[in-house]
């Protein structure tokens, strides 16, 4: 049953579209307002000051490129792996910040003003699981072709 | 020669994506009018002078950036009960600890606190704070309150972190 769920090609396709769209929607406001996103990163008080702008510049583009690649099936193993890495990092970051009691804006979708919350954490975990499902299937697909 | 474009495993594919992203991101940032410096510069705050702060009876013309009060100025204002201190963090953080006499108006839920805000005279001397220097809630609340015609708004940028650090060093 679980195996069928993991191997399901339709689920993989839906997961690619869902994760891809979420990443694209999340990236656009951050690319448009990099200084605002830099402030959101700073508020987490984890990234060293000199790296904040580098993160603020590269993460949104990484989200956008991964999102497009997932939807169009380009470099699927690499894009799903990076997507899983991103969502793992975001989940850890949100959980740590919540445990530290930080009262900050999530910054997840740019300027949406949504506060950091456990629901955001579970959204990220869901997207992480979908990314892992895509990654697993892209590896299997590759093996079948060889 | 073209082998690099035919990645053999997931890590090679990921590396190609990362290199591509770095080139596009930095190229776009270089060309964009909203581009930011690659290395973050330390924020500087426009601190208000004692004479202006303590003798101020009417509103001040201010720019988009809000003037900052120092720890000693804030302590003086609390001692004299001459300012309304507002904590812009969420209620849970406020309940865990806040600056004495502060009231809580969380920026992220400020519309729920409109009933409180409209009872405050617009010429009240107000000091807003949040988590610390990296927190934007105080500046955002200040902007929103300026739009509500409050005229004497200042920010304590060091926030609760600065306040608690100062309290710890006093106790040493």
Image (cartoon, coloured by chain):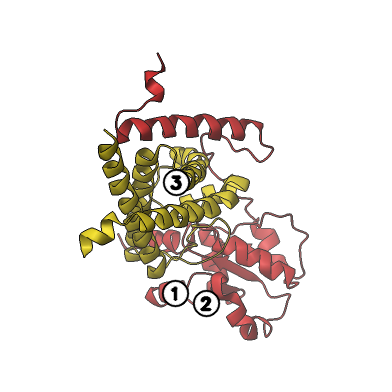
What chain does mark 3 sit on? A
Q: Residue at x 24, y 60 (%)?
A: A4
- Crowd class of label 2 (few under 14; some 14 to 19; many from 20; radius 10 Å): many
Residue A101 seen from this side: no
Q: Secondary structure at mark 3?
A: helix
Asked whether disc 2 touches disc 1, contact meaning CB atoms under 8 Å apart, the reply is yes
Q: Residue at the top extreme?
A: B1
User: Closest to the observer: B78 or B15?
Assistant: B15
Q: Which chain is red?
A: B
Secondary structure under tag 2 reads: strand
Of callouts 2 and 1, the N-terminal one:
1
Q: Which mark is residue A70?
A: 3
**In this view of the protein, can residue A15 be seen by the observer?**
yes
How far across and how far down the image is residue B49, in percent?
65, 55
The tag on residue B104 is 2
Residue at mark 1: chain: B
In which quadrant is the C terminus of chain A drawn?
Answer: top left
Q: Marks 2 and 1, Cα distance to the nearest angstrom? A: 7 Å
On-image quarter of the N terminus of chain A: bottom left
**Residue B94 - label:** 1
- For this orientation, the residue located farthest to the front is A145
Pointer 3 with pointer 2, Cβ within 8 A: no
In the rendered view, tell whether residue B154 sits above or below residue B43. Answer: below
Residue B7 drawn above or below residue B85: above
Q: Position of residue B145 (x, y in %)?
A: 68, 70
Q: Is residue B9 above or below residue A81?
A: above
| Pointer 3 local density, CA inside 10 Å: few below 14, some 14–19, many at least 20 | many
Please indicate whether residue B32 sits to the left or right of residue A143 in the image.
right
According to the rendering, which colour does chain A have? yellow
- Near mark 1 (Cα within 10 A), the count class, few <14, some 14-19 or many ≥20, is many
């Amino acid at each position: 049953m679980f195996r069928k769920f993991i191997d399901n090609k339709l689920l993989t396709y839906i997961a690619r579209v869902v994760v891809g769209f979420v990443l694209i929607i999340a990236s656009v406001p951050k690319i448009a307002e990099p200084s605002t996103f830099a402030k959101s990163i700073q508020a987490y008080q984890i990234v060293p000051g000199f790296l904040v702008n580098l993160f603020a510049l590269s993460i949104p583009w990484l989200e956008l490129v991964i999102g497009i690649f997932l939807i169009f099936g380009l470099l699927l193993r690499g894009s799903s792996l990076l997507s899983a890495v991103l969502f793992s990092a975001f989940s850890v970051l949100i959980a740590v910040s919540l445990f530290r009691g930080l009262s900050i804006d999530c910054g997840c979708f740019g300027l949406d003003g949504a506060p950091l919350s456990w629901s955001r954490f579970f959204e990220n975990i869901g997207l992480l699981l979908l990314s892992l499902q895509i990654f697993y299937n892209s590896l299997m697909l590759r093996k079948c072709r060889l | 020669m073209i082998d690099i474009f035919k990645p053999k495993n997931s890590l090679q594919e990921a590396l190609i994506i990362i290199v591509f992203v770095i080139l596009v991101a930095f190229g776009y940032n270089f060309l964009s009018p909203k581009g930011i410096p690659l290395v973050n510069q330390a924020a500087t705050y426009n601190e208000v002078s004692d004479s202006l702060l303590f003798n101020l009876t009417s509103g001040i013309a201010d720019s988009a950036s809000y003037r900052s009060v120092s720890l000693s100025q804030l302590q003086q204002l609390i001692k004299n009960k001459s300012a309304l201190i507002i904590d812009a963090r969420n209620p849970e953080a406020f309940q865990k600890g806040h600056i004495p006499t502060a009231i809580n108006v969380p920026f992220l839920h400020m519309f729920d606190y409109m009933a409180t805000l409209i009872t405050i005279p617009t010429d009240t001397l107000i000091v807003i704070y949040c988590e610390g220097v990296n927190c934007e809630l105080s500046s955002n609340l200040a902007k929103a309150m300026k739009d509500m015609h409050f005229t004497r708004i200042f920010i304590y940028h060091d926030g609760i972190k600065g306040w608690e650090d100062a309290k710890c060093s006093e106790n040493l």
